[in-house]
Amino acid sequence: ASTPATPTRSRPRSDSAISLVEKALSLPRGHSSQLLATQQQDIDLVDSIKLTWERDVERTIREKYATSDHTPFLVGLVGIPGSGKSTSSSILKDMLATESMIDGEEEDAIPTIVIPMDGYHYSIADLQNMDEAEDKIYRRGAPDTFDAAGLKRDLGCIRNGDEDVVTIPGFDHAKGDPEPDAHVFRRSEHKIVICEGLYLVHDADGWEGIASLFDMTIFISSDVDVCIDRLKIRNKCIPGYTPEEIEFRCDAVDRVNANTVMRSINHADVVVKSAAALVAATELEVLVGKFADDEDDDNEAVAF
């Protein structure tokens, strides 16, 4: 799927969707409320494509940040492989870091940084020195193939430390390995930190306690079959594998990882479902049939 455009701010917000976010966040951690910012009883399907959940969550993050007793404000964004975590985290960052009008009031820009969990993959060299190295390398992306302790340490430094600078690893897809110091958190600059990844609310395999470091956790609920099909297309560019091997690995490894992630869905504060995911799943034919002759350009906002 191509990267959806950042939703325009001129469209009206859904008060019902916003109230669902606020209600979900008022519940104790672990009592997740289903948030569907694209509920068809409140917004018609075309509007829901333009008014994705990111807009409503942006408002809630701003409100929670304004009443927080500490900075930075940490947000964990979780989803299965292929669910659009990177795209949504980028959208949220751009929204928060931009001055905007919300409900007729001007909102200041809030300096925000995105930290991908991908940088905490164990390197191939590290995996080769572990027990069952060949299996771990093939299953790379599973919970035990990440440096969860390193992520917990760095998030703890960001949240509770006094260091002005905390460097965070990234992931070099060309090399297939982590890249040290790819992201730089500056305490004097960044007021909101969005960490996006698979296992941020996972409570086993060394990931215990990481969820408690976040002020707010969001889970992108997605159809596993749809996301695995996306991965099969996206991963065909990976060198060293035939298309058949890519398809097999997506089912044998990525699907297992996706199911592991989905089992932690109730640990998140808020569960959202994006309009793009809805369209990519079952409603695409309905959209195409209903709006094929529409000449008002509304369907140009659909991003695939």
Image (cartoon, grey):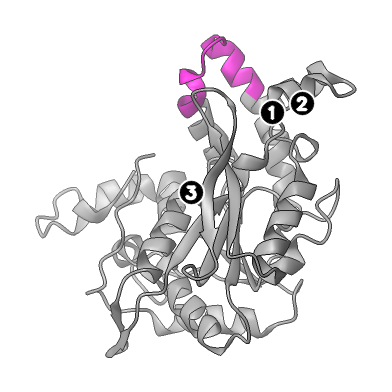
Q: What is the three-letter code of the residue carrying label 3?
A: Ser
Answer whether residue 4 is magenta in the image: no
Is residue 220 something one can see in this rendering? no
Q: Looking at the image, which is closer to me, 204 or 117?
A: 117
Q: Which residue is mark 1?
A: 123
Q: Looking at the image, which is closer to me, 188 or 124?
A: 188
Pair 2/3: label in front:
2
Vertical relation: 288 (above or below) 232? below
Label of residue 126 in the image: 2
Q: Say what secondary structure mark 1 lies in.
A: loop
Q: Say what secondary structure mark 3 lies in.
A: helix
The disc, 3 or 1, on the residue closer to the chain's N-terminal end is 3
Q: Which residues are magenta?
A: 233-249
The disc, 2 or 3, on the residue closer to the chain's N-terminal end is 3
Residue sitting at 41 percent across and 84 percent down? Answer: 15
Residue sitting at 62 percent across and 81 percent down? Answer: 70
Q: What is the three-letter code of the residue carrying label 1?
A: Ser
Quarter of the image for the C terminus: give it.
top left
Q: Residues within 10 Å of mark 1 (few under 14, many from 20)?
A: some
Q: What is the three-letter code of the residue carrying label 2?
A: Asp
Residue that extends furthest to the right in the rendered view of this protein: 131
CA distance separating discs 2 and 1? 5 Å
- Proximity of marks 3 and 1: CB atoms separated by less than 8 Å: no
Image coordinates of residue 130 in percent, x first then y, are 86, 24
